[in-house]
Image: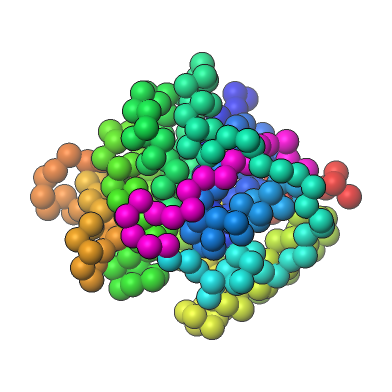
Amino acid sequence: MKKRKILLDCDPGHDDAIAIMLAGRHPGLELMGITVEAGNQTLEKTGRNALNVVQYLDLDVEVALGSSRPLVRELQIAEDIHGESGLDGFEFPDLERDFSDKHAVTFLIDILRQSEEKITIVTTGPMTNVALAMRLEPKIIENIEEVVLMGGSYGYGNVSPAAEFNILVDPEAAHIVFTSGLKVSMMGLDVTRKVLALPSVVKRMEAIGNKASRMFADLMNAFNENQRKVYGFEGGPLHDPVTIAYLVAPDMLTMKHVHCDIDLSHGVSYGRTNCDVFDYLKQEKNAYVATDIDAERFWELIEQGLKRYDDLE
């Protein structure tokens, strides 16, 4: 099987950590690097979290630090969901690895320019690093196969009635990516709210009994506690790994080709992904939006992903 080359841009974050786990050893993917920006927590914390996950899972992948704030607005973090560290709930060993000596934007540009094959960009946080790379070196767009993001919603938001967190943190960056002319595939709240890490799911994964499954269970227990406090969910939506599920098993999701605008009005709907699901406006379609997911197949994929780390014991 030819591996699909991907770059993962993230802001760990509990669900980002599970996306790294799933992508890191999947036989169909080649993880070319991880870039980090501020989002779920400050850059200092999200960067440390990414290094901790990579070291703990013994992944041979570079981590590059990027943007500490959005393009225009002030940084908004999600401490109420991800905690003071951004990855509360699990005690990682002392950190020995270090970051790439390149800024994340330079890191992205260099890999994309040097690759002989097109690379897929996966974003599970704000899209600041990717947007800056596109603006700084527009030629890299020619070497991007697709942008797959966790973000947005054609329904309602999770940090305002209209907006989803990853998009609202940096709507201007999202606008740059959605208007890039690339294939953009959006895994929004409409599907991620269908894959809830219920207590029964956490017990199922914990029973695997390896290092990865212990990390999963501890992180999800903390994640779920905060989700109950904020949203009343018994199980937190495992948002970010849906991007990886789409890449390795696209038939797991139902997609719809639509025109999508990012609301940049700075009004009450600032950051909304306005998806013309019914094609009212007859505008050029610029995004594929996930509308449904096979939840049981998703959890089977997570279980398989965790079992790939059995040799770490």
Q: Is residue 147 left or right of residue 262?
A: right
Q: Judge whether residue 122 is colored magenta.
A: no
Q: Residue 297, percent across and down? A: 57, 53
Q: Residue 154, percent across and down? A: 30, 60
Residue 267 seen anywhere in this rendered image of the structure: yes
Give the residue at x 58% y 35%: 102
- Viewer-closest of 280 and 102: 102
Seen as rendered, the residue at the extreme left is 281
- Viewer-closest of 145 and 66: 66
- The image shows residue 118, relative to residue 246, as above or below, that is above
Q: Which quadrant, please, contains the N terminus?
A: top right
- The image shows residue 175, relative to residue 117, as above or below, that is below
Seen as rendered, the residue at the extreme right is 313
Residue 15 seen anywhere in this rendered image of the structure: no
**How are the residues colored?**
rainbow
Q: Is residue 236 left or right of residue 183?
A: right
Q: Which residues are magenta?
A: 57-75
- The image shows residue 190, relative to residue 95, as above or below, that is below
Q: Is residue 155 left or right of residue 201?
A: left
- The image shows residue 30, relative to residue 191, as above or below, that is above
Give the residue at x 54% y 38%: 103
- Viewer-closest of 260 and 111: 111
- Viewer-closest of 270 and 284: 270
Q: Is residue 34 left or right of residue 255?
A: right
Q: Residue 203, percent across and down? A: 73, 69
- Give the dominant element type of the magenta stretch: helix, strand or loop: loop
Q: Residue 183, percent across and down? A: 34, 35
Give the residue at x 63% y 41%: 63
Q: How many marks?
A: 0
